[in-house]
Structures are given as C-alpha cells and as structure tokens.
Amino acid sequence: MRGDAARVVRGVRPLSSAGPDDLSFLTAAKYRDEARTSRAGAILVAKEEELPHDQLVCADAPWALGEVLRHFHPVAAAAPGVHPSAVVAVSAVVDATASIGPQAVVGESTRIEAGAVLHAGVVVGARCRVGPGSVIYPRAVLYDDTELGARVTVHAGAVLGADGFGYAARGGVLVKVPQVGRVVVEDDVEIGANTTIDRATLEETRIGAGSKLDNLVQVGHNVRLGKSCVLCGQAGIAGSTRLGDGVVLAGQAGVGGHLELGDGVQVAAKSAALQSAPAGSKLAGVPAVPLNEWRRQVSWLGRLAELGRRVRRLEKAQERTAGAASEEDGR
Amino acid sequence: MRGDAARVVRGVRPLSSAGPDDLSFLTAAKYRDEARTSRAGAILVAKEEELPHDQLVCADAPWALGEVLRHFHPVAAAAPGVHPSAVVAVSAVVDATASIGPQAVVGESTRIEAGAVLHAGVVVGARCRVGPGSVIYPRAVLYDDTELGARVTVHAGAVLGADGFGYAARGGVLVKVPQVGRVVVEDDVEIGANTTIDRATLEETRIGAGSKLDNLVQVGHNVRLGKSCVLCGQAGIAGSTRLGDGVVLAGQAGVGGHLELGDGVQVAAKSAALQSAPAGSKLAGVPAVPLNEWRRQVSWLGRLAELGRRVRRLEKAQERTAGAASEEDGR
Amino acid sequence: MRGDAARVVRGVRPLSSAGPDDLSFLTAAKYRDEARTSRAGAILVAKEEELPHDQLVCADAPWALGEVLRHFHPVAAAAPGVHPSAVVAVSAVVDATASIGPQAVVGESTRIEAGAVLHAGVVVGARCRVGPGSVIYPRAVLYDDTELGARVTVHAGAVLGADGFGYAARGGVLVKVPQVGRVVVEDDVEIGANTTIDRATLEETRIGAGSKLDNLVQVGHNVRLGKSCVLCGQAGIAGSTRLGDGVVLAGQAGVGGHLELGDGVQVAAKSAALQSAPAGSKLAGVPAVPLNEWRRQVSWLGRLAELGRRVRRLEKAQERTAGAASEEDGR
C-alpha cells in the first residue's frame, strides 16, 4: 500500500467509471493518462506510479486483479441435485454434491463427480466422465466416451467428441473412415463457447492440463495439446498435430495437419503454421515464417513500389550508358 | 410502373425460375442478360431497363424487394404463452403476449417483455432482459445478466455472455481473471447462428443499435460496437476494441485487441486490422493497410518474378560494363 | 496377405500402441520407421513393404482401413421410438423405426423417415423432412422447411436454415430483406459440429449429394454445392456462390459471393477465392491465384531483402560509373 493503508473499497471498476469507493487498476502503460484523472479511491499498479491516488502495488498486477475480483465476486454455488426435467440414465452415477440443471441429459454409465455442475440443456453422452468441480455451461455437448478431468470449464455450445473429418475417396465417392477414438480433457482446462474438439480416429484427442481455448476454436482428430496451451478465438488445428507445452495460437491462426510444434511455440494472429517448428519458435505469416522474417517481408511489401521505381531508374541509366557506349563505338 | 399497371403478381422468384405470375428483380448489372430471357411477369428494377417486361421501377430496389417479400411472406406470429415443457423460474416475469417454446429455460428474476419469442430449447439465464418484440431462435443461450433491447433477433446456437478470455500467467500456470461484467445488445440488432459475444471483464460488452452480425462471428470481452455495424461471417474482434458507427468487417476479417476503428471504417475480407484507424478508412491485408495500398502490394506481388528478371538483366549489363572497364584499364 | 495367413487380430490400433493381437496400418511414408519397430501383429499397407510383420496389402489402404474399422466397431442401433421427454407436434409423421431422443423437438407437418435418429435435444422445425437413415446429433437445429435426404449426418450444434445475411441500407439504417427460401441437403452428406448453412433468400441453398462439411464451416444464403465437395474446418462461402462437383476448400479458406468455382477446383488453406475459377483450378493466396504462381510469390517474398540488397549494389555501381564519367568529363 502506498498512501492511506486504511482505505476501504467496495468494488472494482475500470479507471473511467471508478468512484471513491472503488479500486481500479493500471495494467498497461497506454492507460496512464486515464489513471491520472480517474476518480478511483485506489489503484492497483505493478510498480509505484506518479499518481495522486492511494496505490496497491503488486508486481504481478494482472494476477492480483483476478484475486481481488474473486474476492468481490464469489461464484454462487449451484444447488446440488438433479432438476426434475433432466433425463439421467439409470446406469449413470451422479455424485450427491453434483448439480444437474433443467433439460440436461446424461447417458448410460456416465459418471458425474463431486461438485460438478451441468447447466441447463447440457447433453453428456454414454460412458463419459465429468471430473470433480468441472462446470459445463448450457447446451454444451459431450459425445459418448468423452472424459473431463477436475475443474474443467466448458462454455455454452461447445461440442466435444464429434467425429473427426476422415474419408477415403473411392471411385469419386467419399467413404467415411469410422472415428472410434475419444476426447480426453485434462484438469483445469477451459473451453470456449461453440468451440469444437473432434474425437480421435482410434485413440485420443487430448487437451493438456491447464490449457485455455477461446470461442469458436476447431481442434481436429488425434490432435494432442501439451500443458498450458493458449488457443485464441477462431484458431484451428488440423488433424494429428501435436503441440508441446505452453504453445500459443493467436486469433484466427491455423496449424496444418500431422505437424509438431515444440514447447512455447507462438503463432501470430491470422497466420498459418504449415510446417513443424522447434521449441520457442515465434511464427507469423501464411505460410508462417519466423516472426522477424515476417516483419521484414511486411516492411518490404510496403516498399515494393519504391523498389520498382529504383529498378526503373537503374534501367534508364543503363539505357543511357548503353546508348552513350554505342554512340562512342559508332564514332 | 412501366408497362401494364394492372399486372397482377402472386409471388417473388429469381429471374431464372420466375413465371408469368411472378415478380422478379434485377439488382446487379451482371444479371441483365438473364433478365432479358426471364419468363417473369414483371421485374423490379432500380431504373428503367431495355426489357420486354413490365417494370416496377424503384430507385432503392434492394429495399423495395424487402418490402415486397414482407408483403408476400408475413411472419407467422408465435402463439403467446409458455409451453408446458419449458422451465421458467418462479421469479421470472414473462409478459402475457410473449411466447416461450418447448424445452426452453428462463432463469430467476429475468424479464421477457411484450411480444418476445423464445423458440424451442432457448436458455436465458438469471437477471436477463429480453426486450419487446425480440426473437430468440432454438438453442441460443444468454448467460446471466445479459440484456437485449427491443426487436433484437438472435439466431440458433448463438451464445451471449460467456466468460471473456482473460488469464494471468503465474509461475507457468494460467490463472483465470473472473469475468464479472455483462453483454448489452441495443435495439434492432440481429445476431447470426452460432455467433459468440463474450461478457465484459467488469462492465459491458455492447452491441450498438441496428448492428447486424452474421454467423460464427466472435466478439471478445469489453468490445463496443457503434450503431449499424456490419460483421460478416466468421469475422472476429479481440478484446476491448471499440468500433464507431457503421463499421463493416467483411467475411473472415479480424480486428486486434485494444484498438479503435472510427465511424464507417471498412475492413476487407480475410484482412486483419492490427492498428487503430480513423473514420472512413478502407483497409485490407494482413496487417491491414489502406485498400489502395493493398491493391498496389497485390499487383506488385504478381510482378515480383518479372522484377527479379529485370534486376538480373541489370546485373549482367553491369558485369559487362565492369568487365569492359577493367579490360580498358588493363590495356 | 503376406506372411501368416492364419494370423488373428482382435482390434485396430496405431503403430505406436498396437500389440500382437492388433492390426495396424501404414498409410503415409513418413511413418515407415515407426512401422518397423511396431509391435503390431499385422500391418495394413498399400503395397508390400520391407517389414518383419505379417502384411495385409490393399491398394486402396485408407478405404480398407475404414472397412476394417466398420467391422470391429459396428454402429450401435438407436432404439426406435419417441422418448417421453421429447415434444413432437401432432401433425408430424415419425416412422415407427425412427428414434427421437430425450428433450428433442419436432415441429408441425415434419416427416421423420425410416431409421432416422434424432439424438438428445435436437430441434427440427415445421415442414421439414429428415430422410431415411439420417442421423442428427445432440442440439443440432433445423429451421422450418429444411430438407435432409437419405443417410445424411448432422453433427451436434450445427444450424441449418437460419436467415441469410441480407439487408438493404436505407437512410443509414439496415433494413432486413426477408429470407423466405430454404435449405436442401442431398443424400449421403455429412455436416460438422457447429457448422451453419443459411436458408436462401427465395429458393434453395443446396448441398450436393455426398459432400462433406467439417466443423465451424459457414455456407451463405443461395449457395449451391455440387456433389462430393469437401469443405474443411472453418471454411466459409459467401452468398449466391456456386461450386461444381468435387470442389475442395481447405481449412479456413474463404470464397467470395456471387462466384462460380468449376468442378474439382481446390482452394488452399487460409486462402480466399475472390473471382470465379474454371474446372480443375488449384488456387492459393489472398486474393487466390493459381497455386504455382502463389508458390513463386511466397518464394520471392522470402528473397525480397536479398533483392533489395542487389538493387542497392547496382545503384552503388551506377553511382561509381556516373562519378567516374563526370570525373572523366571534368578532366
């Protein structure tokens, strides 16, 4: 604390709307001017700032903001029990502390473990596992045999375990290759709204522990993600590709099939990784190249007209020289 | 009317399939040949055309086509009342003229206003508002605290109010930043099938009045759209970005986070706006540049091989000159 | 069979996990080393390989793999009948051999034909047809008037028949053009999870027989696909475009509106076809150009820095020449 250590705040609001009873936060330099004029009672900062406000200094400010929000906005516990409108198969095992919402459907031999929450209209197929403390938001669908670990969050409309996209062309007709594997989601994963993760052809499509997938992301069959991967909105991964730990795909990025991206690889927004890449690579472009190289390409793209003019100038000079030379020769 | 003002038509069909009882329409020059041979009884045109048909001339032909279609295809009113299979919380307030379809779910303290329609299987969370005349198609989901204004249309599978994609990395682990804001959709907005709009971290993600979002569009947390924006299919906007009025994102376009696009900005298909842009900008490319500049870049891209050959020719000429010069020096 | 024709296998597994009781398969050259050390009892190959294993040689190996999987993993037949929690309109006609899952909804005058399966929570609107043997996975939605042929598969969350994206701008306001057409899906089509196919403005959006659409694909209004088209994950087609037979859109590819792509056209991943293209074209890039041209462009992009240096060297040489010449002149 810098300033009045007895300062009391009753909520968290952004710089522009915070009042004297609110804690606000300054986590990006571009908002420093806005901070100066904020009416916030106190401001959470990463290091002490030249501000007239009381300051809560925390080196890891984004994390601290999360902790403060958790304090002010505790998650309301869902009431345990099965809503009378839900349809739960006789052979399913639902823990007494789990919550099954209205219109939800739970298939044969499925286990819903302690504290798990299925919101309204969720469909969980047969032989699935929903691990302890996992939460599935309305209308998400788990096909048969899908497994969620502990504390997994699945947002509304996400579909886990639909058939992978596998066909064999035979005489001009596409014949389906049965997709008989499954999807396994490890602990502490979060999956965004309307995201789709296909079941494996034979074994597992696997999402590593702590990975976070944004909305409308596509994960093809047989893909394996390491731990703590981050897949931003509308990113997509074609079949049988493996990502190491901590791989980041920015928004609308794509990764081709049957590739390996090592630990910590980052693919920029709108880019397409079409080759395997070693750990730590930062890639951009279509097809993706090392980020620095892409920046040079972009820079050159903007100067092509100028380059063209320079070549034209050289050609004219060369024509003059050639003309002069032939004149000389002709003397 | 040009031609027989007493002409009666009984429906609207495209040029290729219209018969003598149909009105057809010519709204793009490329279909003029097709118009000439159409069997349509009459043709709606923007200005009088050299056609053998009776013509209904309306300067604003696309709008007129809409009015005519509305005349021939009035929307069937949904029967008011709550379907017996729907689950409506006791504290929810449903207007007597509203319609709640089979298997729908309405949460605590939610208001469903006059004439609103929730089709089959819609889930509306707690403390939501569905304004008068709004229509929500099957299986769309509104998370808690979402607000829809008047005459909003939400298509099937759309998800409004899922958590924004916010995490703080701490010791290699991604810790969730609670997303405690909400989504507000102003009047006359239309939201496409399976589109996702995330709730704000703290305050509001807001969709301005009259905006139209196509299918599979992603709108990140804290984003604000002005009035009458158009987001075409599979477009995406990263978090905390603000769009002015009348901004257009073409299909599969993307906009980075924490940016401002002024009124009327247009981003071309497949392009990515990664910097803020003033009102009226027309952008294309990845990263997006002014449209004219992008066209030049594309044109140069197609001529790079030629440019390379010209440089090679210059080098050869220069080698000859240098050779000649050194020969001369060597004499 | 090469090797022990009496070999018995009890399942199919990938090279890395197969044991002596399993058949495995080698369908891509890059996995040859893995095959050599596999513990599989037998390996399915396209032609005889130098392997110590018993081999099942089948020229069309991917197809044969599918057949073998179908043998080992027969699809469990859904129990015929209507689940008591489903809501089926009185005027709907459900074949006695069809299966309607829990929480499903079937609208007025809709026909569900022999052997069709509607899984949990499916919503089929009014006046639809679900042809014989078609399967609709949980939470998929068919709007009114949608028609599915025989043996169609629709995966979870897919939305068929939502309104096309059509508006007329009038005085700065976007006025909806009613979308009164429908979606027709021919026989043997498969549609991926959360994919969206819009109804036509007036007549039909049509998906040709045997076409396969992956997850999160967007098909705009009035689009027509020929037979056996392949649309990979997150591909999108703008309105009124026509695809011939056997057209392939790779992942995240896009096609502009009002275009025609001839039979067998292929659009590469992340590319955008913005012009019509004749049969057999292979396209890549944004905007898409012939694949070979795109490869040359990409190759040149990687050598722009070098080209720039070469031009700089020529300029310096030219400056020296000009300097020498003016020196000479000045003598």
Image (cartoon, coloured by chain):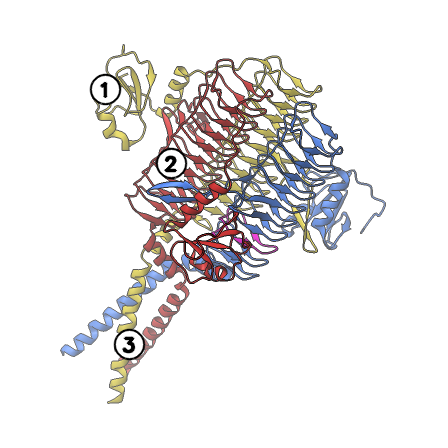
Chain colours: A blue, B yellow, C red
The residue that label 1 is drawn on is B53
Tell me where residue A279 appears, x and y as whole percent: 57, 61
Using the image as rendered, state which of residue A52 and residue B212 is in the foreground.
Answer: B212
Chain for numbered disc 1: B
Discs 3 and 2 lie in a common subunit: no
Q: Is residue A247 magenta?
A: yes
Q: Are marks 3 and 1 in contact (CB under 8 Å)?
A: no
Discs 1 and 2 lie in a common subunit: no
Q: Quadrant of residue B27?
A: top left
The relative height of residue B131 versus residue A299 in the rendered view (above or below) is above
The relative height of residue B33 versus residue A311 in the rendered view (above or below) is above
* Residue range corresponding to the magenta coloring: A236-257
Q: Are marks 3 and 2 in contact (CB under 8 Å)?
A: no
**Distance (Cα) linking label 3 and label 2:** 61 Å
Amino acid type at image mark 3: Glu
Q: Residue at x 62, y 36 (%)?
A: B162
Tell me where residue C248 appears, x and y as whole percent: 37, 43
Amino acid type at image mark 1: His
Q: Which mark is residue B220?
A: none
| Drawn side of residue C185 relative to residue B46, left or right | right
Tell me where residue A39 appears, x and y as whole percent: 73, 41
The residue that label 3 is drawn on is B319
**Distance (Cα) linking label 1 and label 2:** 40 Å
Q: Which mark is residue C210?
A: 2
Mark nearer the viewer, 1 or 2: 2
Mark nearer the viewer, 3 or 2: 2
Q: Residue at x 69, y 38 (%)?
A: A17
Instruction: Look at the image and tell me whether residue C252 can be seen.
Output: no
